């Protein structure tokens, strides 16, 4: 049995396996992927990975629409020391690539030490919505009140509205990478087939779409996967209205958390913080970047943080 076959079997047997580690997810987001099996004397971890060539350099990193990946431990109860040892092994494996980056799940924050980290906000949804809303910032509550008066939320069976607004949002962010339309379509088809998520849009009385959001879920958590706001309706409070709706969705589905998936854009991070979630700095799995590629990416403004 290959490492990939063993990994697929492990995920089938583990009903708590995270969504973004699932083999069917990787099949949807990349054409080819593999698995490296990492071992210590008494522990095993799996690293699903993919690679590609660009500008003559080798890249290995989170696929599009896969905000978390990296290590999946055969036993979630391993001690921090064991997890750290397997993490170090994975770093050595990734040295073969000119650049690498796999963002681990927030639950590994604190258990694994890494020089590189990202930030997200996790909202505990094991409460009533009223209890959660009590911790919203007052400015957010005003936005929501305005949005509730002028907008309605609908479920959209197509990804096209979402993708159009997503592109519109990216036009306001210089050097942002664009998720290919083909990948969005493949993952959306997967979500519909397996019941993994929904797309919601916020519209006014004239059927103008102000914002759209893609909500996905696994056994433990609801996630904000992709979304955006139309430039001409930025003041309508539509995105906050949609995020509130997704939080309610996570509560209804008995999820433990709603994950905003953070942002490296300061303004967006402040907006997410307004919902009262807990800020989590989670580890990034990577190896040293080739100095020539690092200089090139810096020049292009694309160096991964």
Image (spheres, rainbow, N blue to C red):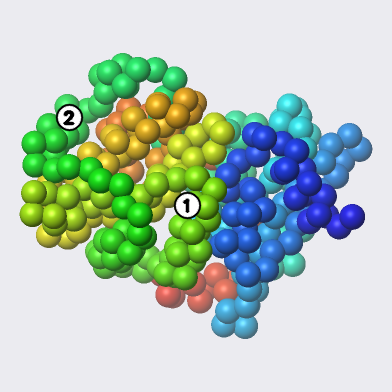
* Residue 219 or residue 225, whichever sits in front: 219
When asked about the image quadrant of residue 98, the answer is bottom right
Mark 1 — residue? Answer: 192
Looking at the rendered structure, the secondary structure element under dot 1 is helix
Query: Label 1: few (<14), some or many (≥20) within 10 Å?
Result: few
Q: Residue at x 47, y 25 (%)?
A: 254
Does 135 sit left or right of 277 as displayed?
left
Camera-side residue of 275 and 57:
275
Q: Where is residue 257 in the image (x, y as percent from the top left)?
A: 46, 29
- Mark number displayed over residue 78: none
Is residue 280 positioned above or below 175 on the image? above
Residue 37 point in image, percent of width and height: 81, 51
- Location of residue 272 in the rendering, given as x and y in whole percent from the top left corner: 32, 39
Q: In this view, does 80 lie to the left or right of 68?
A: right
Q: Residue most toward the bottom?
A: 56
Q: Quadrant of residue 56?
A: bottom right
Q: Say which mark, if any, is on residue 141.
A: 2
x%, y% of residue 75?
A: 76, 32
Which residue lies at the image location 56% right of the left edge and 33% below the top edge? 219
- Count all numbered tags in the image, as a single digit: 2
Q: Which residue shows up at 91% across the image and 38% down it?
A: 41
């Amino acid at each position: 049995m290959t490492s990939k076959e063993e990994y697929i079997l492990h995920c089938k047997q583990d009903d708590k396996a995270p969504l973004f580690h699932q083999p069917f997810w990787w099949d949807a987001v990349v054409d080819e992927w593999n698995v490296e099996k990492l071992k210590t004397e008494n522990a095993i971890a799996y690293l699903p990975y993919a690679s590609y060539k660009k500008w003559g350099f080798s890249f290995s990193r989170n696929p599009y629409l896969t905000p978390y990946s990296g290590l999946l431990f055969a036993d979630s109860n391993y001690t921090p020391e064991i997890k750290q040892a397997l993490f170090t092994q994975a770093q050595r494996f990734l040295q073969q690539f000119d650049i690498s980056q796999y963002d681990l799940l927030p639950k590994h924050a604190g258990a694994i030490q890494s020089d590189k980290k990202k930030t997200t906000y996790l909202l505990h949804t094991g409460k009533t919505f009223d209890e959660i809303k009590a911790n919203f910032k007052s400015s957010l509550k005003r936005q929501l009140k305005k949005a509730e008066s002028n907008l309605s939320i609908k479920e959209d069976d197509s990804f096209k509205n979402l993708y159009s607004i997503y592109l519109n949002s990216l036009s306001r962010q210089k050097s942002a990478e664009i998720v290919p339309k083909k990948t969005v379509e493949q993952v959306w088809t997967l979500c519909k087939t397996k019941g993994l998520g929904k797309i919601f849009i916020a519209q006014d009385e004239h059927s103008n779409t102000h914002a759209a959001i893609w909500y996905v879920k696994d056994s433990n958590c609801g996630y904000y996967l992709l979304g955006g706001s139309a430039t001409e309706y930025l003041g309508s409070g539509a995105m906050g209205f949609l995020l509130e709706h997704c939080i309610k969705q996570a509560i209804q589905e008995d999820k433990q958390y709603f994950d905003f998936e953070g942002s490296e854009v300061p303004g967006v991070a402040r907006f997410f913080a307004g919902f009262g979630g807990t800020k989590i700095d989670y580890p990034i799995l990577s190896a040293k970047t080739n100095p020539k590629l690092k200089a090139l990416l810096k020049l292009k403004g694309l160096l991964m943080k």
